[in-house]
Amino acid sequence: MPGSQKSLLFEGKVVFLLFLPIAEVLGNCGQPPMYPTAHPLVEYMKRKDYSSGAKVTYKCVVGYRRLMGSSSVQCVDGQWTPLKMMCERKSCGSAGEILNGRFKYEDVLFGDRALAECDMGYRLVGRNYRQCQDSGWDGDIPLCEIVKCPNPPEVTDAEGAGLTEGPFDFNSVISYRCLRGQLIGDREIFCTENGTWSSPPPECKEIVCANPHVTNGRKTHGYGKTYQYKDMVSIVCNPGYHLNGTGQILCGEHGRWLPYVPQCLYKRAMTCSQPSVANGRMTSQHRPVYKYNDKVTFACNAGFRLNGTGKITCREFNHWVPRVPQCVPLKGATFSKILCGPPGKIKNGRFVTNKTHLGSVATAVCNKGYRLVGQGQRKCLNSGWDGDIPQCEITTCISPNVTNGFQKGKLRDTYKYRKSVSFACHEGFLLNGPSSVTCDENGEWSPSIPTCSALNGKCSIPAHQNNAHPRVNFQTQKEYASGAEVMYTCALGYRRVGGSLSVQCINGEWTELKLKCEPKSCGSAGEIRNGRFMYDGVHFGSRATAVCDEGHQLVGRGYRDCLDSGWSGDIPHCEIMRCPDPPEVTDAEVAGLTEGPFDFNSVISYRCLRGQLIGDREIFCTQNGTWSSPLPQCKEVYCMNPVVTNGRQIRGRRSTYKYRETVAFECDLGYKLNGPSMVMCEADGKWSQLPACVKVQCSSPLVHAGKIIQGSSGQYIYGHSVTIECDYGYQLNGHRRITCDRDGQWKPSVPTCESRKAECPHPSMHLVRIQDGYKSQYTTGDTVTLYCSHGYRLIGPSSIRCDQNGQWYPYLPHCGY
């Protein structure tokens, strides 16, 4: 094997060294390698060179622990054997249990974080995370303290149910009852998760409203000089007057009448003047004055179309709803000479016209929310635009009236476009419809004005909803009168996190339940040494499944369920796996543990006192409670003298060889080795794969433009000779006779046949001269450039080349006149 460091070249043969044993002659090793999860022990890091056979022990890096495999490597043949030790990230298990809170885990392995969070209504005290370190979770378990509200201010003339000495915990409820006066505000307040009360405390006070006086009107109900909170008065107008506002008013919490004291207006205010439409006509009956709710219809003249609705209605204060329509020209109309300029400008509106010809019409259009006052169109006449420029006034809505209800806030007779009004019903009445309406561009309230209906319907048993149900004492009654209240409680496994506990029967319907109930949290299921819980949640109905670390087995029930009272069952245990005592190995001594029990990852090393070690020198206890491999044996193992046909051992031939001894081979002359040059005696008394000596063979000597004239054969083996000859016109470059050598190569090397060069006659002659390429002798491939003496011209090619036949190509020229 030329180039091999394990061979010496002698004349006529290749010699392979015999290693007895291998470790005696193999090279040294440098520093042992570093692995991502394992490093050599500190004492090995200082050395830079190790002799063959030296061993180095590794340990897992910080945060990792040994899982399995041998912790040592050995220097063999100048190379370190691979490290078989496997290291895995350490597990910290549970980060602990937080009362009224929990940890949320990325994972529980080295480097991971557990984030602490508290249940609603609790606040965190301490650092909000713990990190898994080499020694376990760092820091301390934080606390979740309940949120507290300060003492609410005292309410004069009131007593409070649940009102004790503070501070008040989250979800604490206080209910108020007035001893004198009326309750203004929420009857029930509770401590929220933010540490504030759900609403300001109510007030108990005497509310007095002044005697409501209506000019041109009188009371029909509620006579008196002074009125208290929630007293009601009914008012009607004298003949010839119309009520502007509601006929029933209520003494409100601020000593004002709600919605407001009405007015009695003269009925003339309830009429409208006759509307007119340019280029159109009224199709309904003509009247000089129209009464409230009278309707008028319109149609346009020929050549015009209606812009707006064709039907309008008379409302208060000479106001038509919707606004008076317009008649605009149809497309395609043409007019003659332009006589008029722009029709003018309208504040909050514009004129619409594309023409200013004689006969053209400019239509006035107001912006959204404005109505037209004046002439709606101007026509282009010979004298210019007719009529005056109209005005655009903002659209208004008359004050809305709700029977058995009132408006909130300041009262007005009319409201401008986009202004809104809010409503409430008197006590004993229910609002049907929106609580507020807005004045739209047509002078109408949008959406429609609501109504107030009497509360007289009864309610059936209230339903279970929002993870809550009525309290037991409310579940026996089958029917409830309007105004009745029912108290709710959270269902099993749920707790209150906000909202009122009660609903009320109003006109046969229960009010919306605002109580919020969320699943109870069980927090951490506990800490398992050498294990952990895997959670699908920590709230009611969730399950925590116990998982043991590698090499440990579960003792106890493998899960805990989150119940109303907390986690079910007890915390299980994780016991370390143990392997049985290994049988004794005859003629061997043991390093490491010698007596059981043998825990997971326990390692036993064997050394033979007699014979050779057959099997693994080191075994360890696996996570399954079994040994990593069968026990080794110490026994005398012999292999018989190996024989290789057409080959021989290099030296030290014996009749028998011991386990792990090696033998090197060389082949006879004319043969080469196919397979390993060295074999080893193995544990079963047999040699590792023996090589074979095969005949040295050369490839067929192919020569371009040549042939074998002696020694041709289908196979060319060591020592075979051939004679080579070139084809006509070619000459041999190399040796004619070559021989197949012991390395499978032809010696001397295979020759080549090259084209033979011919000689051409000198091209210079009478009157012909050489311009370029002059030589004394010309052979195949040479070229020359020719010319003639002065006064003569060249007849033929000026450039010629000497070919392989000794002729000039294409031909020799000559000189002439």
Image (cartoon, helix red, strand yellow):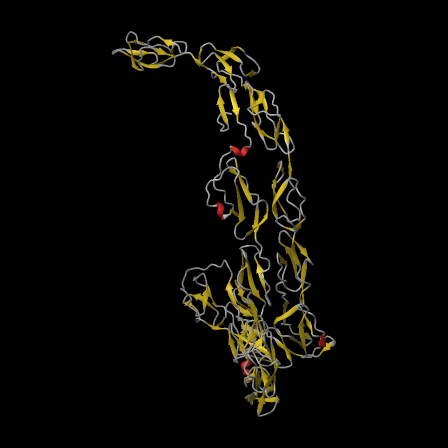
In the figure, is residue 336 to the left or right of 777?
A: right
Residue 783, image x, y percentages = 35, 15
Confirm whether residue 10 shows in the render.
yes
Question: Residue most toward the left?
Answer: 790
Q: Nearer the viewer, residue 772 or 85?
A: 85
In this picture, is 301 found above or below 710? below
> How many labels were placed on the picture?
0
Q: Nearer the viewer, residue 268 or 408?
A: 408
Q: Residue at x 74, y 76 (%)?
A: 476
Q: Nearer the viewer, residue 635 or 30?
A: 635
Residue 311, image x, y percentages = 57, 70
Q: In the picture, residue 510 is in which quadrant?
A: bottom right
Residue 702, image x, y percentages = 51, 16
In this picture, is 246 found above or below 465? below
Residue 33, image x, y percentages = 50, 43
Q: Nearer the viewer, residue 389 or 129?
A: 129
Confirm whether residue 506 shows in the render.
no
In the figure, is residue 58 to the left or right of 641?
A: left
Image quadrant occupied by the C terminus? top left
In this picture, is 299 found above or below 589? below
In this picture, is 517 found above or below 592? below
Question: Residue most toward the top?
Answer: 766
